[in-house]
Amino acid sequence: MQKGTGQGKMNRKTHHQKKEDVSRKWYVIDASEKVLGRLAARVAKLLQGKHKANFSPHVDCGDFVVVKNASKVRLTGKKLQAKFEFRHSGYFSGDKYIPYEKLIKSKPERILFLAVQGMLPKNKLRARYLKHLKIYAGAEHPHGAQQPADMAV
């Protein structure tokens, strides 16, 4: 045996996923009494496809994720009063700060959307990942025809 070659010849080729070979599944996650950050991290991982063995960072190989009961998500500490959603209209003094305490009553889906969006990579695939995310404030969702699997987080 030659020095430095190991136990014979090995296949050292890296497999890169192609977008034609991607198979997608649908998952349903119940967000009631789940901590926002931990839930968002798990959803971001599913959207990117990092849980799959054939993950490729340059290909959208993630799954569809349906999150229900987003209005019952939990924020730890004083984040409900201290955390704000920031928006700007583009005009001078056009900035708006909406506290999460008010936002969770009017648009609870928006809180989870912003958390997941912040955990996704800042590149061209981000918008495509977010199209695969479906968030609903209540327990009902219209994606029963896709036969989604329940995911425990």
Image (spheres, rainbow, N blue to C red):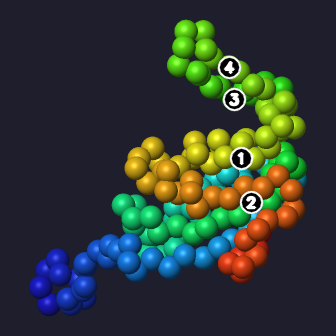
Q: Residue 76: x percent and y percent?
A: 82, 39
- The total of numbered circles placed on residues is 4
Whole-Å distance between the Cαs marked 3 and 2? 20 Å
Give the quadrant of the C terminus: bottom right
Q: Are marks 3 and 1 in contact (CB under 8 Å)?
A: no
Foreground mark, 3 or 4? 4
Amino acid type of the residue that numbered disc 4 sits on in the rendered structure: Lys
Q: Hey, what amino acid is under mark 3? A: Glu
Residue 66 at x, y percent in the picture: 71, 64
Q: Is residue 103 left or right of residue 130?
A: right
Residues marked 2 and 1 touching at CB (< 8 Å) = yes
Mark 1, residue position: 112
Q: Residue at x 68, y 78 (%)?
A: 146
Residue 55 lies left or right of residue 84; in this view the side is left
Q: Which mark is residue 85?
A: 3
Q: Secondary structure at mark 3?
A: strand
Mark closer to the chain start, 4 or 1: 4
Kind of residue at badge 2: Val
Which element is circle 2 on? strand
Residue identifier under label 2: 67
Q: Quadrant of residue 51?
A: bottom right
- The reply to whether residue 18 is in sight is yes
Residue found 20% across the figure and 89% down from its top: 9
In this rendering, the answer to whether 11 lies above or below 28 is below
First of labels 2, 4 by sequence position: 2
Element marked by disc 1? helix
| Residue at x-position 76% and y-position 64% | 29
